Image (spheres, rainbow, N blue to C red):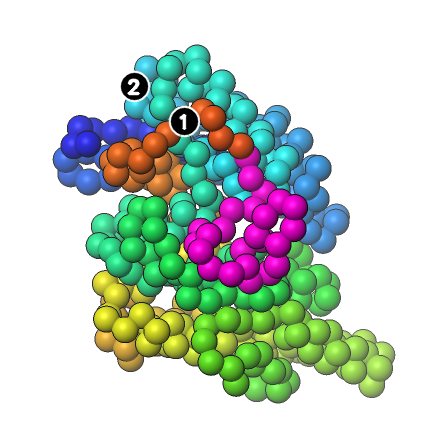
C-alpha cells in the first residue's frame, strides 16, 4: 500500500485520554496533531490511578479530545482513511471507552478500524520517529510494563526477558508514595534524586546474579521502605536530605539493573540489531536514559529514544501502529474484544502468571 494514509488514533488504556492524527506520505510520517488530557489531579488524593474514576473520565473526555485532534490537524473525518484504537492491554473500563467510540466513528463513516496492542504502539514508535529498519532491540519500560523485545516485524516480537513483579514505573510510584511525594512518582523521585547521594544507602540490585534478562523491582521498593523506617525509628522522622538520598539510591539501583540487563539482552540477540530503542514513561528519566545510552555505545549499537512527549502514553503511536498494519496488509475488523491482558509474544511463557483472562505479560 503506497498511497498516502491518514489515520486517527485513540488511546485510553490507563489515565491519559488521547487522540492524534498521523499521516504517511511520500516524504515519510508526519504527526499532524497529538492531544493528551492527563488525569493526575483526579487521582492525586488516592496515591495512584483509580480504575473507576479513570474510566468515567475517559467516557466524558474522549469526544472532545478527538474533536480537538481533528481541528488541530486541520482535517475532517471525511479525510481520514482509518481509525486505530488501543484494544488492550490496560484498565478495561478505559479501554472499552475508547473502543466503543472508535467503533461508532468507523461504522458511521465506513472506515477501516484497526485494533492496536498498546505495547505495539510503544514498540513501533522508533519507526515513526526515526524510520529504523527491523530487527531492532526494544526496551519497553513504563508504569505497567518492562520487557526486552526483539522487534522483527510489524506483527512479530520475541520477548527476551522482563520483570517478574513490579514494573519500574510502578516501583517509582510506590517509592514516591512511601516518601510523601506527589504522583506521578517518576518525575517526583527524579527531581529529588538530583540533589541526593546515590551511594549513601546500599540498595540491592535484584537478579543481577542470575543469567538472562528477567528483572525484579518489588524487593528494591521493600528495601527502601525498611531504610525509611530505620531512619524514622532512629530520628523520629526523615529530613529533606534523607529523602533526597533515598530517591538517589533507589534511582541508581533501578538504572544499574536496567543497564546490565540491557547489556545481556544485546548479547542474547547475537547478530547486532539495527538499534537499541527505549520507550515508555520511564524512558523519560534522564539518569536512566544516560545509563542505557552508555551501554549502547559500548556495544557499538545505535541508541534511539523517542522525544519525551512520545515516551509516555499518547495516541500518535497508536495511529502509527495502525498505519503500519494497514501497509503490511494485516487484517482489520470490527469483530474484536477489548482485552485487559494482551502479551506481545504469545509463544513465551507468562512472566507474571496466568488467570481466566489470560497471561498477564
Secondary structure at numbered mark 2: helix
Residues at marks 2 and 1, CA–CA distance in whole angstroms: 20 Å
Magenta span? 338-361
Q: Which secondary structure class fits the magenta region best?
A: loop
Residue 142 visible, this orientation = yes
> Residue visible at 33% across and 56% down?
151
Please state which of residues 204 and 88 is positioned toward the viewer in this rendering: 88
Q: Residues within 10 Å of mark 1 (few under 14, many from 20)?
A: few
What's the residue at 45%, 43% (across, down)? 117
Report the quarter where the C terminus lies. bottom right
Label ID, residue 333: 1
- Say whether disc 2 or disc 1 marks the residue closer to the N-terminus: 2
Q: Is residue 291 visible?
A: no
Would you name the residue on which mark 2 appears?
Answer: 79
* Quadrant in which residue 202 is drawn: bottom right
Residue 339 vs residue 248, the one in the foreground = 339
* Left or right: residue 219 compared with residue 90: right
On the image, the x and y values in percent for residue 45 come to 75, 48
User: Does the segment drawn in magenta span residue 348?
Assistant: yes
Quadrant location of the N terminus in the rendered image? top left
Q: Is residue 60 above or below residue 271?
A: above
Does 342 appear above or below 350? above
Question: Residue sitting at 55 percent across and 35 percent down?
Answer: 338
Check disc 2: other Cα within 10 Å, few if <14, some if 14-19, many if 20+. few
2 and 1 marks in contact (CB < 8 Å): no
**Where's residue 269, x and y in %?**
31, 70
Asked whether 307 falls inside the magenta stretch, the response is no
Q: Position of residue 205 (x, y in %)?
A: 56, 81
Task: Quadrant for residue 198, please give it.
Answer: bottom right
Determine the residue positioned at 70% across, 44% down: 50
Amino acid at each position: 500500500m503506497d498511497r498516502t494514509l491518514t489515520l486517527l488514533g485513540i488511546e485510553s488504556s490507563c489515565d491519559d485520554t488521547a487522540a492524534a492524527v498521523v499521516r504517511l506520505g511520500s516524504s515519510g510520517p508526519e504527526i499532524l496533531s497529538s492531544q493528551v488530557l492527563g488525569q493526575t489531579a483526579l487521582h492525586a488524593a488516592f496515591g495512584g490511578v483509580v480504575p473507576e474514576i479513570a474510566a468515567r473520565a475517559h467516557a466524558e473526555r474522549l469526544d472532545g479530545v478527538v474533536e480537538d485532534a481533528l481541528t488541530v490537524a486541520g482535517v475532517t473525518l471525511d479525510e481520514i482513511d482509518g481509525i486505530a484504537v488501543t484494544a488492550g492491554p490496560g484498565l478495561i473500563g478505559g479501554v472499552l471507552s475508547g473502543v466503543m467510540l472508535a467503533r461508532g466513528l468507523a461504522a458511521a463513516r465506513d472506515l477501516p478500524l484497526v485494533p492496536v496492542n498498546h505495547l505495539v504502539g510503544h514498540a513501533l514508535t522508533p519507526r515513526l520517529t526515526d524510520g529504523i529498519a527491523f530487527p531492532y532491540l526494544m526496551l519497553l519500560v513504563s508504569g505497567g510494563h518492562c520487557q526486552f523485545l526483539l522487534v522483527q516485524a510489524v506483527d512479530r516480537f520475541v520477548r527476551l526477558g522482563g520483570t517478574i513483579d513490579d514494573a519500574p514505573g510502578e516501583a517509582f510510584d510506590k517509592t514516591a508514595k512511601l516518601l510523601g511525594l506527589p504522583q506521578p512518582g517518576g518525575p517526583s523521585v527524579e527531581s529529588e534524586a538530583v540533589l541526593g547521594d546515590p551511594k549513601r544507602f546500599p540498595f540491592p540490585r535484584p537478579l543481577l546474579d542470575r543469567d538472562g534478562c528477567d528483572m525484579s523491582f518489588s524487593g528494591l521498593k521493600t528495601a527502601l521502605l525498611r531504610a525509611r523506617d530505620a531512619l524514622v525509628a532512629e530520628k523520629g522522622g526523615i529530613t529533606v536530605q534523607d529523602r533526597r538520598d533515598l530517591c538517589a539510591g533507589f534511582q541508581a539501583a533501578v538504572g544499574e539493573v536496567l543497564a546490565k540487563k540491557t547489556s545481556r539482552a544485546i548479547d542474547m540477540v547475537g547478530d547486532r540489531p539495527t538499534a537499541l530503542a527505549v520507550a515508555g514513561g520511564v524512558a523519560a528519566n534522564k539518569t536512566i536514559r544516560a545509563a542505557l545510552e552508555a551501554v549502547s555505545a559500548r556495544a557499538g549499537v545505535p541508541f534511539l529514544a523517542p522525544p519525551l512527549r512520545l515516551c509516555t502514553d499518547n495516541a500518535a503511536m497508536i495511529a502509527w501502529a495502525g498505519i503500519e498494519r494497514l501497509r503490511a496488509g494485516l487484517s482489520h475488523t470490527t469483530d474484536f474484544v477489548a482485552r485487559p491482558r494482551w502479551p506481545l509474544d504469545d509463544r513465551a511463557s507468562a512472566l507474571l502468571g496466568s488467570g481466566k483472562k489470560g497471561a498477564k505479560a
